[in-house]
Image: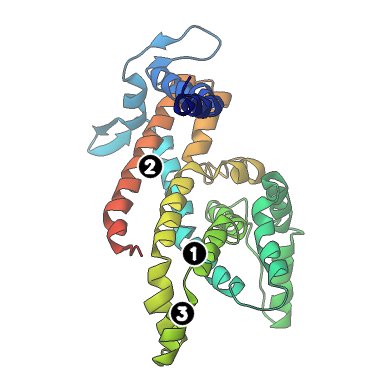
Amino acid sequence: MKVRTKETLTAYLFLLPNFLGFLVFTSLPVIFSLILSFFDWDILNPPKFVGLGNFIKLLGFSFTDKTLTFNDPHFWYYVFNTVFLMLVIPLEIFGALVIALALNQRIRGIVFYRTIFYLPYISSGVATAIIWRGILNPDFGLLNTIIAKLGNFLHLSFQGPNWLSHPFWARISMMLVGLWTIIGGNNCLLFLAALQGIPRDLYEAAEIDGANSWQKFWRITWPMISPTTFFIAIMSIIGGFQGGFMLAYIMTGGGPGGATTTIEYYIFNNLYTFQKAGYAASIAWVLFLIILFFTRLSWKFGGKKVEYH
């Protein structure tokens, strides 16, 4: 056997475990879920073929007395919840950039500070949700206690909201906890790596030309990290549509009145609570198409703003 052939076979042999893992744990479940979306299956009884029935039930609507009525109004309400929670994404990106800029400074103990900001991201999500559920408790929670003490200090009658029992404040709570968890995580790490990849001589040349801090950021830093910013924006959009389950499951159970139930949570409920496996699969595929649409949209309009060097 030739050396080149032997090396090729060896390479394929090393790739085989990953290929089998991708085939068994990714490709086959995806194909199975697509097939399942055309069936009505309660897991206990044999599946029944319904064609596009699940998708019509999910996305269909009718006009009754000049009133638009959705076949599944819950789905659209949960789409609204998901999009509402995603409104925090620009703040997450901006916050991650600000922290990365701060952590990119050459100061004493910078490794310690970087570790501190990354800790919330690697902490257990369940533990984080339980802790925040205590902090947001309206009766003895830390946040409302601080608000009350601040009111007393200012001689005003401040009273914190019922964070997890009011639909609006429950959504705000989810956004607040999500922001706290993500802002110092991978996004910050990616920005930090991008910042450290900018050649120092560009800043030195700008300083010789008399550029101030803002001019150096806007003319050098921002264009140089634009590919990273675009990547983070795309991944945040994808993650936003796929997220919102764990925190809501532990902190609010999807309530109050479904105010914190997202599309991902709805898939979980249909599969495990209502035992509608086919319907859950159809929601998953509609979610895939939504993510694909917004990703393509972002790429079309946002990709033109990216500067590659």
- How crowded is the residue under tag 2: few (<14 C-alpha within 10 Å), some, or many (20+)? some
Left or right for 99, reference 295: right
Up/down of 110 relative to 72, above or below: below
- Separation (CA) of disc 2 from disc 1: 26 Å
Looking at the image, tell me whether mark 1 or mark 3 is earlier in sequence order: 1
Q: Residue at x 66, y 72 (%)?
A: 158
Cα separation between marks 1 and 3: 16 Å
Instruction: Please identify the residue farthest to the top as the structure is shown.
Output: 46
Mark 1, residue position: 194
Please report the residue visible at 58 percent of the width from the left and 72 percent of the height from the top.
104
Q: Is residue 222 left or right of residue 276?
A: left
> 80 or 186, which lies in front?
186
For the residues marked 2 and 3, what is the alpha-carbon distance in whole angstroms? 40 Å
The answer to which of marks 2 and 3 sits earlier in the sequence is 3
Question: Marks 2 and 1: CB-CB under 8 Å?
Answer: no
The residue to which callout 2 is attached is 291
Looking at the rendered structure, the secondary structure element under dot 2 is helix
Q: Nearer the viewer, residue 302 or 33?
A: 302
Residue 201 disc label: 3
**What amino acid does circle 2 point to?**
Ile
Q: Position of residue 155 (x, y in %)?
A: 70, 82
Three-letter residue code for mark 1: Ala
| Image vertical order of residue 233 relative to residue 158, above or below | above
Identify the residue at horizontal 71%, vertical 78% (top origin). 108
* Amino acid type, mark 3: Asp
In primary-sequence order, the first of circles 2 and 1 is 1
Residue 193 image offset from top left, x and y in percent: 53, 63
Residue 278, image x, y percentages: 44, 20
Relative to 208, say whether 161 is above or below.
above
